[in-house]
Image (cartoon, grey):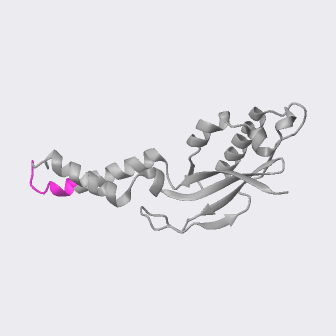
Amino acid sequence: MSSIYFYDLPVYRLSYDQYNALMDQRLAKQVERLKYIPGYDPPKETVDGMSQRQYEAFGPWRFNETIGYIRLYFLGSQVRGEYFSAEKKRNMLGRTKVFVYRTWKLAAEVEIHRDQQVANERVWDAIQEYVARCRKELKKGRVIDDSLLHTVGPHVDWLALLGWSGSR
């Protein structure tokens, strides 16, 4: 029985909102340091430049705060997910990451019961259930971004991908 890999879910060390709040705090501290003269407010251009340099140093959340990936796959009639991560004792802001294989199954697999009534919706429901199980297995605070999967998932012909097209 061979595996059918179909999607890599990114895992983040913190949410998008938390990341932006952290960036806002960093910028506010830098601006506050410029106010060494009472009543002095740095010009908007200076603050904008500081914000741009911060963005260039740390980059956008989606691509630079990733600490792992869950590689979703089908094994027979099961949904599973391998986990690769770059987690260390302490994950800081930054871009130096090496992803390593952690486990062949992050959470308990979800069985897709194959009967006369199996449909794409049942497969999609099983995938969503597996992702929910993965959320429970990750360290507290970790965030799985399944937004793009939710964009395409309901429209995929999962039965054809599994080779079950005649099962409808």
Rendered residue at 78%/51% (across/down): 109
Q: Can you give x and y, in whole percent of width and height, for residue 168 in the image?
A: 84, 31
Q: Is residue 29 left or right of residue 119?
A: left
Vertical side of 94 occupied by 107: above or below? above
Please give the count of numbered marks on the rendered protein: 0
Q: Is residue 123 magenta?
A: no
| Residues in magenta, as a range | 31-39
Q: Which residue shows up at 9% across the image and 55% down it?
A: 37
Quadrant position of the N terminus in the picture:
bottom right
Q: Is residue 85 left or right of residue 51?
A: right
Please report the residue visible at 45 percent of the width from the left and 57 percent of the height from the top: 64
Can residue 32 be seen by looking at this rendering? yes
Question: Relative to the observer, which residue lies in front, 141 or 133?
Answer: 133
In percent of width and height, residue 85 lies at 59, 63
Position of residue 39 measured from the top left corner of the image (x, y, whole percent) = 9, 47
Where is residue 114 shown, x and y percent of the image?
87, 39
Residue at 38% across, 55% down = 59
Residue 134 in the image: above or below residue 122: below
Looking at this view, name the residue that lies furthest to the right.
116
From the viewer's perspective, is residue 132 above or below residue 93? Answer: above
Reply yes or no: does residue 37 show up in magenta: yes
| Residue 142 seen anywhere in this rendered image of the structure | no
